[in-house]
Amino acid sequence: GTDHGGNTVIIQHGNTYRTLYGHMQGFAKGVKTGGTVKQGQVIGYIGTTGLSTGPHLHYEFQVNGVHVDPLGQKLPMADPIAKAERARFLAQSQPLMARMDQEKATMLASSKR
């Protein structure tokens, strides 16, 4: 862990970007110092370690080691999906996108007065 953040996972994304997840109750099986993780992989569990006053996740986004507002960052574009994989991607993503659209419509309908 790191000083006041308790149990912490730090993920290095290339040379420039780093994300930090603090106050973790514990780490997921297989997550270890110097190891690699994949997008979507569970890395740990929300907790209240370090100087935390209650269970929560402390998230930081860093650029060249400096904490920045993640919403204000202009991130580099990812490589496009390969043509050979595009049909499979659409087949898997379309049902999820439709479900998210439905959830969004439900939330909007319930918030109107």
Image: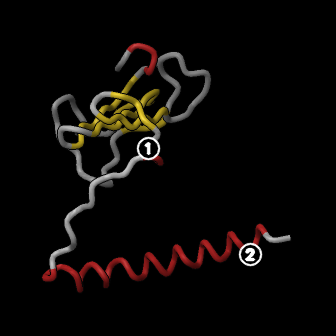
Residue 90 quadrant: bottom left
What residue would you read off at disc 1? 70
- In the rendered image, residue 10, in percent from the top left (x then y), is placed at 30, 32
At a point 36% along the width and 18% down the height, the residue shown is 2
Q: Quadrant of the N terminus?
A: top left
The quarter of the picture where the C terminus appears is: bottom right
Q: Residue furthest right?
A: 113
Q: Which amino acid type corresponds to the residue marked 1 in the rendered image?
A: Pro
Seen in the image, is 8 located left or right of residue 52?
Answer: left
Q: Is residue 21 above or below residue 82?
A: above
Expressed as whole percent of the image width and height from the top left, the position of residue 77 reads 27, 60
Q: Which mark is residue 109?
A: 2
Front position in the image: 43 or 63: 63
Mark seen at residue 33: none
Q: Is residue 59 above or below residue 99?
A: above
Front in this rendered view, residue 112 or 55: 112
Q: Residue at x 60, y 73 (%)?
A: 103
Element marked by disc 2? helix
Please state the horizontal and vertical placement of residue 110, each as a whole percent of the image. Answer: 76, 70
Relative to 8, does residue 73 appear above or below in the rendering? below
